[in-house]
Image (cartoon, grey):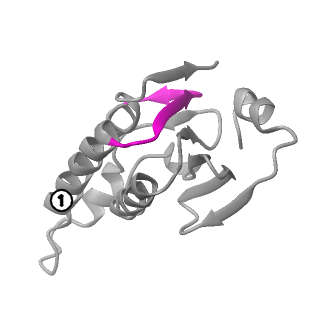
Amino acid sequence: MLSSFGRHFRRGVPRRSFCKSNEVLFDDITPYMSSVTLNAPSAMNALNLNMVQLLRGQLDEWNRSDTLLVTFEGTGSKAFCAGGDIKSLYNARGDSSTDIHDRFFREEFQMDYMLAKMKPVQMSIYDGVVMGGGVGVSIHSPIRIATD
């Protein structure tokens, strides 16, 4: 669900949508403008390892493309992003086959750095709670819009 700003901004604009996962939605609005929608409303759009990896991969693509602007927003009105998905990290405790805790934080902080250095301009639309990982995703954005 788009914020009221996002709905107004996109009205009548032809789009090419693509999705790598239902947790993160990517959308090419024009050849020079793309959007990211964090799509985990039941978890208040909290970031998990899969979401971080999807975002990192897309950042590489945008840095190699002609994209000039990328908007970031969250699904629902409760949260843009309530941080890291602590529940998924807690549920992975004791799993000796993977060190998901270290991987999650290492990859999340690398993603935050990539966002700070990304070539396209980032615009973040806050609709609801912004904490932890949500701040990391959006704090480097030179354009931050807070809604209700």
- As helix, strand or loop, the secondary structure at mark 1 comes to helix
Depth order, front residue of 6/65: 65
Depth order, front residue of 9/25: 9
Quarter of the rendering occupied by the N terminus: top right
- Please report the bounds of the magenta region as a residue range: 118-131
Amino acid beneath label 1: His
- Residue carrying label 1: 101
Above or below for 47 versus 93: above
The residue depicted at 18 percent of the width and 59 percent of the height is 101
Depth order, front residue of 42/124: 124
The residue depicted at 72 percent of the width and 27 percent of the height is 5
The percent coordinates of residue 123 (x first, y second) are 52, 31
In this rendering, would 20 be left or right of 2?
left
In this rendering, would 76 be left or right of 38?
right
Quarter of the rendering occupied by the C terminus: top right
The percent coordinates of residue 46 (x first, y second) are 43, 46
The residue depicted at 36 percent of the width and 43 percent of the height is 118
Depth order, front residue of 131/125: 125
